[in-house]
Amino acid sequence: MVFDAEGRPVADWPPFPAGGPEIGQRPYFTHVKAFRRPHVSEPYRGGETGIDQVMVMHPLLSERGEFLGILGGNTSLRDGEAYLNLRGRRLGEAGHILLATADGQVISHPNEAWLMQALPGMETHPLVEQALLGWQGSGEGLTLDGEPALVAFRQVWPADWLVGVYLPMDELQAPVRRYARELRWVGIGSVALMLPLLWWLLGLGLRPLHRLERQIGRVGQGEAERLELDTGMVELQQVAEAFNHVEAGRRDAMESLEAREAFLQAVLASSPVGMFLTDPRGQVNYLNPALTALSGIALDDYRPQAWLRRVHPEDRGAFLAGWRQALLPGGVLTQLYRFRSGEGEWRWLEVHANRVSGGGRVLGYVGLVQDITDRHEREQRQRWEAEHDPLTGCLNRRGFARRLAAACELSRRKADHALALVMLDLDHFKEINDSAGHTVGDTLLQRVAEALHDTVRDEDAVARLGGDEFAILLAGASAAVAGEVAERVRRRLAEIDFRHGGRRFGISASVGVALFSEEDDDVSLMERADQASYRAKQGGRNRVVMADAYLPLDGD
């Protein structure tokens, strides 16, 4: 069958009556899609056919390496020709071959009742338990049906399969028993004479099996690539041929895997972006050179606490919470935090990590780490410039409008949260600017901004709304406090005094104060404060006027 990149059937032979299954969510399809290499699925029962089967798949890739789909073939564990032939193979009369997955599920056995069943455990079949843990070799054990036998196991790593060869002890001992029956009536002298010959014949009969065992061991240790048996036992020759076929497939798969791993290592090592890999528990097991250069931490020196100590103290809580969330089912890591680089500088890092799954289990995580310090600082600077006056450093009209709207909304929701707005219009500034020049005017505006910042609290917002108009937003200020601050600002501005070109310059301001009420919004509050400032200017300048009351200056 041919499936597209989403697991939908494209072509099949023989055709499915209903058009074939969609396998996009099945573990064997996601495994091939993720790793893009040939794969043999775990045994499963087909939902469409109800047949116990396995699928052999090969990825279909474009010239650029893009995943296009898979070419796959199903074979029945019960009726497939290969498995029928394997179940029919015999060593002598009762010797047979077992094929199972690395998880202990039987794929092929002469007794069909064992198909798709779990292998017995340590208590009755210790050699089987060892083979499931990766052991290869031979020894005395039991067949799955409980008969004593000589057993040999071999791992088929590419498919995660296990091959077992069983030769029942009854059959091994059959020649001895046969000779014993034939010699039963021979006298003690004849027995003594024939005993050496009997032992020689027994050794001769077992010699091919011992050679098979030794050659399997040599192949397993990498000293040979295939079995070469010179024996007249047809069954052993068939076992050797089957073993050589499986071993050739394993060797080809290993070579392909090594080539892909070498290519992946080259890609990771040459990437200018920091990259890391972890195991399913989140333990880092690879750092590429770019990430080592950025962090100053090599893989041999990596410890979770060492990395955590480099994270800015204010960001550590979010850093740990993000990783805990990513380790949950369906979790994805996206983080932005400050990190002390290998050169001792605080850098802004952007981290993305995704889970890698295959065969129905989590294989680990792959992550990207980028140094975005320049971009972050540029964006911060752009945000600051968008809402601040470049001459005085105060908020501009846009920035102040945002702060004012937010403060009004908070006061409207919280009745006990007072809010006052102070508007200032500099007296006679235009005449000074026109007569002394823009340099003096700009200097005067800067001195005014400094005086306002020095007079109010850090949390109060100071803005230059344009020209010679300034505003102060006082959060939590009552009428008395707002009036006191406004008067203090007026006096502070009146103290400004500097000389330029032999002339002395000073400034005063007409100040209006408005308190937020339930009927107000940001627009109406500014209008009332501006009207109060206008009344102060009309009343003689250099004075403070409340929107609802008039406050004359001391000694005015």
Image: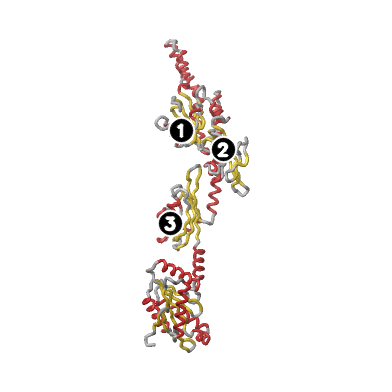
Q: Residue 245, relative to residue 90: is it above or below?
A: below
Depth check, front residue: 71 or 165: 71
Q: Which residue is mark 1?
A: 118
Label whose residue precedes the other's in the sequence (2 or 3): 2
**Would you say the residues marked 2 and 3 are in contact, meaning their CB atoms lie under 8 Å apart?**
no
- 431 in relation to 526, above or below: below
Residue on which the image places disc 3? 319
Residue 408: where, in percent of width, then height?
Answer: 44, 69
- Residue 107 visible in image: yes
Q: Secondary structure at mark 3?
A: helix
For badge 2, the amino acid type reads Val
Quarter location, residue 145: top left
Q: Nearer the viewer, residue 442 or 236?
A: 442
Q: Which mark is residue 56?
A: 2
Q: Secondary structure at mark 1?
A: loop
User: From mark 1 to mark 3, how far is it between C-alphas?
Assistant: 43 Å
Name the one closer to the observer, 75 or 271. 75
Mark 2 → mark 1, Cα distance in angstroms: 22 Å
Q: Is residue 509 visible?
A: no
- The x, y position of residue 510, in whole percent, is 44, 82
Graded by Cα atoms within 10 Å as few (under 14), some (14 to 19) or many (20 or more), the crowding at tag 1 reads: some
